Image (cartoon, rainbow, N blue to C red):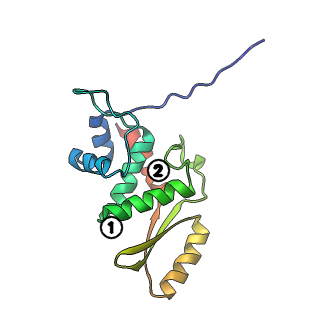
C-alpha cells in the first residue's frame, strides 16, 4: 500500500523582503497593523525578532495601498477589506502560481459613495461590475473601481523579480 502526502509550504517574507516587494514604508505598515487593517502571519516572538509576512499579507498590503491612495480614510479601507474577506474568503489566501489559475469571479471591487462619510462596497465579477457601474453613474453617484486580480498579477511579478 502506497500512501502519498502533499505538503504545501507557504513562503514567508522578512520585513526587508516585504518592503522591497510592496514598495511601502515600515512606519505605514506598522500603522496599518496597529489600526487592524491586517495582521502579519507571524508576529515575531519577543524583542529582537521580526515579523514574517505571507503572500496573502503582501496582497493585503497592495490592496491597502491602492485603496488609501484614492481614499485616505483608514476606516474606509478597513470596511473595504472586510467586504473583500466576507464575499471572497479565499482571496487573500490563494495567490496561485499562474495568471490563468485566477478565479475570474468576484474580482472587481466597487466602492459607491453615498455621501462624504458613507460608502457601500461590492465585489463583483467583471460583467456585473460593468452593469452596476453604469447604473451608479446614471444616478450621479461617485464610484471607485479596482481590479483585484490585477493586484494579484502585480504581486506575482514583484515576487519573481526579487
Give residue 160's position: percent from left, percent from top: 41, 39
Label 2 packing within 10 angstroms: few (<14), some (14-19), many (20+): many
Secondary element at tag 2: helix
Mark 1 and 2 residues: CB-CB less than 8 Å, in contact? no
* Mark 1 or 2, nearer chain start: 1
Q: What residue would you read off at disc 1? A: 70
Q: What residue would you read off at disc 2? A: 152
Give residue 112's position: percent from left, percent from top: 45, 75
Which of discs 1 and 2 lies nearer the camera? The answer is 1
Q: Residue at x 65, y 21 (%)?
A: 5
Quadrant of the image occupied by residue 146: bottom left
Secondary element at tag 1: helix
Give residue 21's position: percent from left, percent from top: 33, 43
Q: Is residue 102 above or below residue 159?
A: below
Label 1 packing within 10 angstroms: few (<14), some (14-19), many (20+): few
**In screen coordinates, is 76 left or right of 31?**
right
Query: Foreground: 99 or 131?
Result: 131
Q: CA distance from mark 1 to mark 2?
A: 19 Å
Q: Is residue 49 visible?
A: yes
Q: Residue at x 23, y 47 (%)?
A: 25
Q: Is residue 131 above or below residue 151?
A: below
**In screen coordinates, is 67 left or right of 101?**
left
Q: Is residue 56 above or below residue 4?
A: below
**In screen coordinates, is 36 left or right of 99?**
left
Dividing the image into 4 quarters, which one contains the N terminus?
top right
Q: Residue at x 54, y 48 (%)?
A: 99
Q: Is residue 92 above or below residue 124?
A: above
Give residue 66's position: percent from left, percent from top: 36, 60
Amino acid at each position: 500500500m502506497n500512501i502519498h502526502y502533499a505538503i504545501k509550504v507557504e513562503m514567508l517574507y522578512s520585513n526587508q523582503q516585504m518592503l522591497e516587494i510592496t514598495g511601502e514604508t515600515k512606519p505605514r505598515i506598522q500603522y496599518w497593523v496597529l489600526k487592524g487593517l491586517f495582521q502579519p502571519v507571524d508576529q515575531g516572538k519577543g524583542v529582537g525578532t521580526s515579523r514574517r509576512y505571507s503572500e496573502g499579507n503582501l496582497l493585503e498590503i497592495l490592496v491597502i495601498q491602492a485603496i488609501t491612495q484614492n481614499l485616505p480614510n483608514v476606516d474606509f479601507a478597513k470596511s473595504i477589506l472586510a467586504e473583500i474577506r466576507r464575499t471572497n474568503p479565499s482571496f487573500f489566501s490563494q495567490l496561485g502560481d499562474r495568471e490563468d489559475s485566477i478565479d475570474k469571479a468576484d474580482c472587481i471591487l466597487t466602492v459607491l459613495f453615498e455621501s462624504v462619510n458613507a460608502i457601500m462596497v461590492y465585489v463583483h465579477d467583471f460583467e456585473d461590475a460593468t452593469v452596476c457601474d453604469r447604473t451608479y453613474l446614471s444616478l450621479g453617484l461617485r464610484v471607485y473601481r479596482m481590479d483585484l486580480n490585477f493586484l494579484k498579477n502585480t504581486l506575482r511579478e514583484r515576487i519573481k523579480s526579487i
